[in-house]
Amino acid sequence: MNTKALGGLELQVHTSEPPQLEVRSRLRTLIESREILSRLTRKEVKVKYTSSVLGAAWAMLNPILYLVVFSLVFKVVLRNRLPHFPVYLLSGLLAWSFFATSLSMSARSVVDNGSLVTKVYFPREFLPLSSVGAAVVDFALQALVLVTFMVATTTGVLGVNLLLLPLAMLALLAFTSAVGMLVAALNVRYRDTQHLLAVALLLWFWLTPIVYSSFKLQHALARHAIFGVSLFNIYLVNPMGDIIFGFQRALYGNVCVVADGARQCVLPQVGVGWLAILLGAVSVGCLTLLYLSWRLFFRLSGDFAEEL
């Protein structure tokens, strides 16, 4: 068995993974090899901003550009009078950008690192996970933009609603990692996956209340039912919708605000406790999905070298 070097680390050449995932054993392997994940993540960040004059500052400019465009469209052209629109938009966009960026990078993570996969052994899970890790850097920079707007406009409510943020983050990380592993594995065998993903993300974005009021979504769907089940309750099956609700309630804060002398509801009319229970259930579901995606990724990873 030969050895190859990856960023100064000695790795053993291996042709395929074991046929079945043994969770405890695999977790030990991942923990012992965590330095490889760190190096792959740094590589993803460097590659993303190679030859860029502004570098990682582009991550901060992207939400500002979205803010300018959507403010022009929804505040000037379509006359949307959503109070404190910048903070509302950025609170949802923060989670969505992390999700979309992670998946776009994850879909190509194995294919783009084909030379590593075919020549050296390392835990293949690190490839999509390094994409998620690289997106965390953008997430942190974009969070600074949001905090700046909150401080500048004194918008946002500090209180018990902030307790929703850790739950929303857990669900977001678990769901993103799960879908990231899935699309990374499928894209090795079916290269159309990355193109279908781009279309799916575009549709998914507009089905998620980021640029329009989540209260209006609740109000419109709650008036209709299928077999006695409210369409809003059916909509809650969408994990990203629930996660966005959590980010909006944690950061934007107010369900209803007074603007131009009138009271206007912006967020879904549900309690913080109800949202906490919802996000807890979503987190459990996303962690279960992560386990299932991990098993599928692990099973398919044994053929990556032959299919690349």
Image: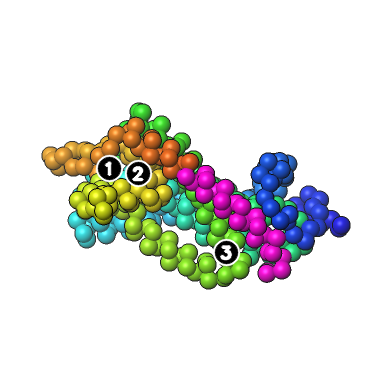
Residue plotted at (60% across, 51% down): 294
Q: CA distance from mark 1 to mark 3?
A: 36 Å
**Residue 284 placement, left or right of 112:** left
| Residue range (magenta) | 285-308
Q: Quadrant of the C terminus?
A: bottom right
Query: Which mark is first along the chain, 3 or 1?
Result: 3
**Magenta segment includes 253:** no
Helix, strand or loop for disc 2: helix
User: What count of labels does the image hold?
Assistant: 3
With respect to residue 201, does 283 lie above or below? above
Taking the spot 72% from the left edge, 65% from the top edge, the residue there is 305
Q: Which residue is mark 3?
A: 186
* Amino acid type of the residue that numbered disc 2 sits on in the rendered structure: Phe
Looking at the rendered structure, which numbered label has been put on residue 267?
A: 1
Q: Residues within 10 Å of mark 1 (few under 14, many from 20)?
A: many
Q: Residues within 10 Å of mark 2 (few under 14, many from 20)?
A: many
Relative image position of residue 24 (x, y in whole percent) = 68, 41
**Residue 80, x across and y down, in percent:** 21, 53
